[in-house]
Image (cartoon, coloured by chain):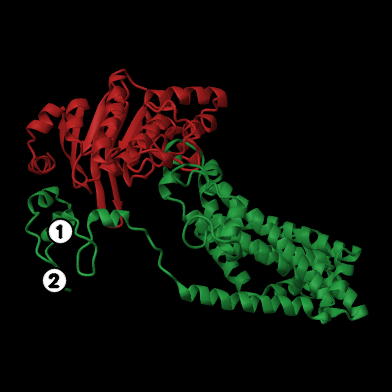
Amino acid sequence: MTQYDTPGRSVTAPGTAPPESGPEPPDPGPEQAAADQAPPLGLHTEPSDKDLLAARLVPARHPGQWLSAGVVLVLFAMLVHTVVANHRFQWPVVGDYFLRGSIMHGLELTLWLTAAVMATGYLLGIGIAAMRLSGNPVLRGLSFGYVWLIRSVPPLVQLLFWYELASLYPRLSVGIPFGPEFADFRTAHLFSGILAAYVGLSLDVAAFAGEIVRGGILAVDPGQREAARALGLGEGRIFRRIVLPQAMPAIVPASGNLLIGMLKATSIVSVIAVQDLLYSTQLIYNQNFLIMPLLMVATLWYIVLTTLLSIGQFYVERYYARGRDRQGRPPARGLWQVARANIPLFGRVAGPGPVGL
Amino acid sequence: MAGGERPLVRVRGLRKSFGGNVVLDGVDLDVREGEVTVLLGPSGSGKSTLLRCVNHLETPDAGFVEIGGDIVGYHQNGARLHALRSRAVTRQRAQVGMVFQQFNLFPHMTLLENITEAPVAVRRLPRKQAAARARELLERVGLGSREDSYPRQLSGGQQQRVAIARALAMEPRLLLFDEPTSALDPELVGEVLAVIQDLALGGMTMIVVTHEIGFARKVADTVVFLDGGRIIESGPPADVLTDPRHERARSFLAAVL
């Protein structure tokens, strides 16, 4: 290899080049010499550097990729066709109900329940992550136990538990632990369906959010915290200004996942008669038996909301990517370029392989 | 505080072990105001740990560090030393600047934000004033035009110079350098050492852990040689570096030079 790079060789060597002979690998030296004499390209002659430099680059062909893409596209077209052409989906009915008032109310409830649950869950989750990372063994153990318990119990069961709390604890009282009581009230009136849904789902999100936040915090270089300490910054400020922003790139994608999951998981509140998006459609189809079209109404709304949230996630991720590359700016790719790069139908843009968000 | 001759930094009987591994084994050290002390020694000799104890990033097992008459990390009350709460430790740390081997600039903040963060949060400087001061400091370390850059856009040497500016923005009484040039490409070492030398000429009190013997010879007032958690040699660079008495110091210098 080194000989190949040495210009001296090529100057002294001309004339000594032996005729190339078949598959036997020649010495690097004479090979270089042959190149300098630029013999005509042939089957058994070595190409010269000039020829190589002038050669056109031909990308590798991937017939398998074309074939598999073709098969997948045909299958996809068939799927779209059956959905659109099957009159049993009753698309006109879907259109009729899509913006109906009761559906809109259900949609509204789904939206704010998701927002409230996520906000509360993340506040608690940050606390749970902080407890788990603290030096206090009691807090650490408590946090671990909480996450273990909540992750073990299906959210539906948690929901029913809060809804039926009155059967376990008919009375709740405020007072000194194990001492006198100041006030008490009956729990039968405490947990309406909507409150049970809010509390149950929030506590569920808190456990998962806690783990996501903890993972993000652990991903931050400990030197960052140390440098901030050495500057005299307080622990709270270090967490807010130094650690959390750097944990965000690890936290955001997982949180986007959790948020979208929760948007749809709120539909389990229909079992305790909370009128969310899904339950609103159920109320209608229980009367008119147009089950499929009304489920399609709910489905389409969930798709719309998930799409909007995914777009939001893209911009949040781009914001937290600042300072991460050498140019210091987030990648200049807009949402449209990323979408295009991932949808083969529109043709690919710059760079090999799909472009990540 | 006692008379003018009392050293700014006094370390007495400092011990620290991690697990069963004794890293500092009774270290005494004085650093006078305006002096540059260079800590030398093989890796694992306790140099960095000593530095981190001065800043209370590590809590010593025994012994104490005193800066400007205050015990670091403790409050003296008769025969007892009460460990300070984190807020008070924070206040003490604000007087001591530290520059790390890996720079540890905040990657999500611009250079200006890196430098103004602590003065605004800790010294309560108005943001405008802090920014003006930060620009002066960036100018001083030769990066005047880069205030809106992010750390990752800079070379290692430039990043380390910003880290020095960030430490200076807190107007520290003492600056600690933990192998400031060890993570740098060889051709970038000079620019960082030049900034440190400049600070020495300006009368900044500094403790520098380094392997740059030439720098120690030129800039240090005192060279301290650590081995196995003890100080085995200490004095002016002319003595310690040219004619070390201790065998370990001699073999280390022979290996490094």
Badge 2: chain ID: A
**Residue A304, quarter of the rendered image:** bottom right
* Label 2 sits on residue: A21
Q: Position of residue A348 (x, y in %)?
A: 54, 60
How many numbered marks are there? 2
Residue at point 42%, 49% (across, down): A222
Identity of the amino acid at label 2?
A: Ser
Q: Which mark is residue A338?
A: none
Instruction: Give the secondary structure at mark 1.
Output: helix
Chain B tint as drawn: red
**Residue B235, quarter of the rendered image:** top left
Residue at point 69%, 65% (across, down): A262
Pick the residue in front: B7 or A354: A354
Q: Is residue B5 above or below residue B253?
A: above
Quadrant in the picture for the C terminus of chain B: top left
Q: Position of residue B95 (x, y in %)?
A: 42, 29
* Label 1 sits on residue: A34
Q: Position of residue A93 (x, y in %)?
A: 88, 73
Label 2, label 1: how far apart the Cα atoms are: 13 Å
Chain in green on the image: A
Pick the residue in front: B39 or B156: B156
Q: Mark 1, residues whose alpha carbon is within 10 Å: few (<14), some, or many (≥20)? A: many
